[in-house]
Image (tube, helix red, strand yellow):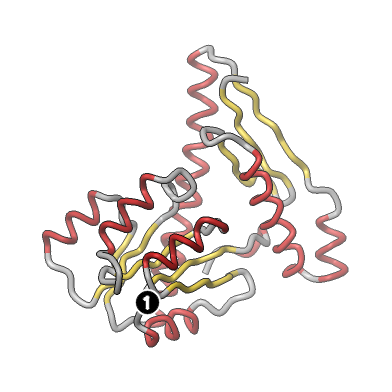
Amino acid sequence: MPNTADHAVVRILIVDDDQHTLDVARQALRAPDLEVLAAHSAAEAEALLEGQTVNLILLGLVLPDADGRSVLQRLGEKAPTATVPVMMLAEEIGPNPKEECIGLGVADFIAKPVDPESLANAIAATLERASSEHLDRFMANVTESSRSGHYSAMALLDLDGLAQINSAWGNAMGDQVLTHTGHAIAELIRDHDMIARWREDEFAVLLPGM
């Protein structure tokens, strides 16, 4: 599971109409730093994503109302989900669909029936890789702005009192504060701005053109 040292809640969306798969995934993802959301169809998932941000999506290749590949493509075309890693759930997948999914940016494939331990390990690896890649992109944009001579600003936003919240109400409450703060910042900045966790109680926001 994700490193809990920074006390950040990770939100995972599972999109599949197989209740057994959903139950096994929930069992595998029981941890205080994880919040698991579930959708039984593409339409339900897309409606849910209109109002919430997630850190990872487990997407069934075959859904009752859509092919998982078409959903994967739509996710990649929308700014809020374009950089969210997607892991594909499938009983069997031939070489052509697999290559197509890879071309659309799928992060990994999970075979059905789902094994809880394998799923937990795969998710941990994908989240760690995604976190590293996001920070790399953030720093690359900072470097590129500096080299190009274009004006950019970087804001460091410090969350006062987080240690006191963790001490008084526990890390779970601190997690919620961090999550809601991150979501609030993301809703206020422009589509081409970038946000990243900087330190335990700090967010960094890169503002190109300012």
Residue at point 36% right, 48% down?
A: 76
Image location of residue 40, percent across then percent down: 40, 75
Residue at point 46% right, 43% down?
A: 79
Residue at point 27% right, 68% down?
A: 61
The answer to which quarter of the image holds residue 10 is bottom right
For disc 1, the neighbor class at 10 Å (few under 14, some 14 to 19, many from 20) is few
Residue at point 48% right, 74% down?
A: 38
Image location of residue 158, percent across then percent down: 77, 43
Q: Is residue 165 left or right of residue 143?
A: right
Q: At numbered mark 1, what does the secondary structure look like: helix, strand or loop?
A: helix
At label 1, which amino acid type do we have?
Ser
Name the residue carrying label 1.
Answer: 118
Say which of 195 and 115 sits in front.
Answer: 195
The number of numbered discs placed on residues in the rendered structure image is 1
Image quadrant containing the C terminus = top right
The answer to which quarter of the image holds residue 188 is top right
Say which of 73 and 152 sits in front.
Answer: 73
In the rendered view, tell whether residue 150 sits above or below residue 98.
above
In the rendered view, tell whether residue 22 sits above or below residue 85.
below
Q: Is residue 1 left or right of residue 126?
A: right
Say which of 157 and 59 sits in front.
Answer: 59
Image location of residue 92, percent across then percent down: 18, 75
